[in-house]
Image: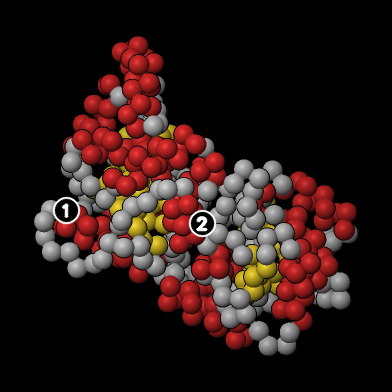
Amino acid sequence: MRTAIATGDYYVPGETMINRHFKLLFGGETCIVTGRYLGENPFGKPVFERRSPLSLADRVRFPAALLLNRLRYGTSRPPFGNRKRELAAFLREQRVEVVLAQFGTQALAVAPLAHEMGLPVFSYFRGTDASKSLQSGELVDAYRRCVPGLDGIFSVSQFLLDNLGKHGIHNQNAHVIPSGVDIRVFRPGQKRPQSCLAVGRMVEKKAPLVTIRAFARATRALPEARLTLAGAGPQLEPARALVRELGLQDRISLPGALSHDDVRRHLAEIEVFLQHSVTAADGNTEGLPIAIQEAMASGCIVISTRHAGIPEAVEDGVTGYLVDEHDEDGYADRIETVLSSGDRQELTANAREVAVARFDNNMLLDKLERLIRDTVAHRRGAPRPSVVAASK
């Protein structure tokens, strides 16, 4: 089924699951509609850039078109004038049968034209688009107008669907499909005792300074314990300064951003994965972090927080441990307990088992394709075997 995938930026190496959709959805029968084209096209896909420079005629139309879009759709995002005609021509030339918007904000941009062309359109909510974005009354209004008319929506966690629902944003055909992980690549290896890893952007919602302080307190009597805190971002230098202040340069390493292959190698070897996710001041939250799914597939014991969709993956005391957001003392206690315990194999085995059963990205891709096909078949009048209620 030829699919146009709408995204904000193309190509972003760190957006592993979105990139997987570009490459593999419906056997790779995809083309790209992007807000910004960043110049790389590793999959050799046809690309349409929505935000390329406007024609003279569209610059003249811009004020009136902006106002009309806001009145009609609650947002200025849909293309207009020549740009709209060019996008319609692109979709026709590519013989597009269905549109999948990665992130709800992209659905606002492409759904109006898709509806005009009679194309089924779906949206995938992944985190910021169903948390921080909801702080904007204008965006909430636009979602309320757009989302109920989509053919279906997907979310990486039930938490995000519930968050949308709290703001009066609903779609009858809503499904939870985590991003998933390649369980054939992310596998347990030979584990190094008392080894810990944290991976992610060095930003407020990842709380890297909390992780450093908690690890320092938890391992006072465990001099062999080691932590690698990988990632780049605005809190990297404060994190390095804190490590120096604590005198733990020999036990906590901050290498900056790592490649996906390097992360995989680290996860295979380390015992404990740390992620103290919190809700940022601007309302930004996780969806269900891919790093946690990769850690579980690699047989790591996850110590994290009761935040967003994380409790949907990590069962406290079974596949890992959870504490409340900002509970630094409780976090430290859990780290100490795990690193001090003699037998960690049961938790490790449980984590791997759950990842295989629930986060296999081949299985999840098949589920996504099946739900899209069933919905489109139903729309065309064929019998539809699957239900349309929200599902996990």
- Residue 177 in the image, given as x and y percentages of width and height: 39, 62
- Name the front one of labels 1 and 2: 1
Q: Is residue 137 left or right of residue 196?
A: left
Quarter occupied by the C terminus: bottom left
Neighbourhood count class around disc 2 (C-alpha, 10 Å): few under 14, some 14–19, many 20 upward: many
Amino acid beneath label 1: Arg
Q: Is residue 237 left or right of residue 90?
A: right
Residue at x 65%, y 55% (from the top left corner) = 278
Q: Is residue 180 visible?
A: yes
237 above or below 221? above
- Residue 367 in the image, given as x and y percentages of width and height: 31, 65
Residue at which label 1 appears: 379
Amino acid beneath label 2: Gly
SS label for mark 1: helix
Q: How is the image coloured?
A: secondary structure
Residue at x 23%, y 26% (from the top left corner) = 85
Q: Nearer the viewer, residue 188 or 57?
A: 57
Q: Quadrant of residue 222?
A: bottom right
Q: CA distance from mark 1 to mark 2?
A: 29 Å
Residue at which label 2 appears: 287
- Residue 238 in the image, given as x and y percentages of width and height: 78, 47
- Residue 374 in the image, given as x and y percentages of width and height: 21, 61
